[in-house]
Image (spheres, rainbow, N blue to C red):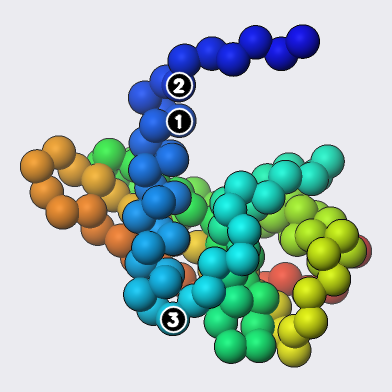
């Protein structure tokens, strides 16, 4: 039996960031298909569609950029994990699409200021999803 614990500040920040990202993506014309898709390989924050392309979106939220912008935090290991989860999603859901890509949304939420939200489309090369 898994016990539920109270959310910590980091998980609350992440949840708020995902809500902001989903809303911004909707305004940009994306259709949100799923949020927080989980598979044995990990989790995808947002899965969306833009036209006939399925878009896998990783959201990174921080309260400052002292150690770099959140967009800079997607390393090769994280990219590989995202590709593996995307592969699981495609095998499980089998969406009809003509393409796929990986986007990243970076959000900096400074106290007393409007959130700085940046979307990077085609954030990294997906290659084959093996």
Residue 102 in the figure: left or right of residue 108: right
User: 43 and 94: which one is in front?
Assistant: 94
Q: Residue, x 75% and y 89% (percent of image)?
A: 98
User: Element type at marker 1?
Assistant: helix
Q: Give the quadrant of residue 39.
A: top right
Q: Residue at x 54, y 67 (%)?
A: 32
* SS class, disc 2: loop
Q: Please state the horizontal and vertical placement of residue 73, each as a whole percent of the image.
A: 49, 49
Task: Give coordinates of residue 93: x percent, y percent.
Answer: 82, 64
Is residue 62 found left or right of 47 in the rendered image?
left
- Measured in 3D between alpha carbons, the distance from the residue under mark 1 to the one under mark 2, in whole angstroms, is 6 Å
Separation of marks 3 and 2 at Cα, in angstroms: 31 Å
Determine the image quadrant of residue 26.
Answer: bottom left
- As rendered, which of 92 and 125 lies closer to the eye? 92
Near mark 2 (Cα within 10 A), the count class, few <14, some 14-19 or many ≥20, is: few
Residues at marks 3 and 1, CA–CA distance in whole angstroms: 27 Å
- Mark 3 neighbour class, 10 Å CA radius: few under 14, some 14 to 19, many 20 or more: few
Q: Position of residue 67 (x, y in %)?
A: 34, 41
Residue assigned mark 2: 7
Q: Compared to 113, does 27 lie above or below?
A: below
Q: Nearer the viewer, mark 3 or mark 1?
A: 3
- Up/down of 55 relative to 62, above or below: below
In the picture, the disc for residue 11 is: 1
Query: What label does residue 29 carry, if any?
Result: 3
Instruction: Tell me the residue at 60%/76% (across/down).
Output: 49
- Compared across the picture, whether 57 is left or right of 69 comes to right
In the image, 32: left or right of 129?
left
| 64, 88: nearer the viewer | 88
């Amino acid at each position: 039996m898994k016990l539920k614990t109270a959310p910590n500040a980091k998980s609350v920040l992440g949840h708020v960031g995902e809500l902001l990202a989903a809303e911004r993506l909707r305004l940009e014309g994306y259709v949100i298909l799923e949020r927080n898709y989980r598979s044995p390989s990990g989790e995808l924050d947002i899965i969306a569609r833009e036209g006939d392309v399925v878009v896998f979106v990783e959201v990174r939220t921080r309260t400052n950029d002292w150690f770099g912008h959140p967009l800079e935090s997607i390393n090769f290991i994280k990219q590989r994990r995202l590709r593996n989860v995307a592969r699981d999603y495609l095998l499980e859901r089998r969406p009809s699409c003509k393409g796929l890509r990986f986007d990243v949304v970076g959000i900096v939420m400074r106290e007393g200021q409007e959130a700085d939200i940046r979307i990077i489309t085609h954030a990294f090369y997906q290659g084959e999803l093996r």
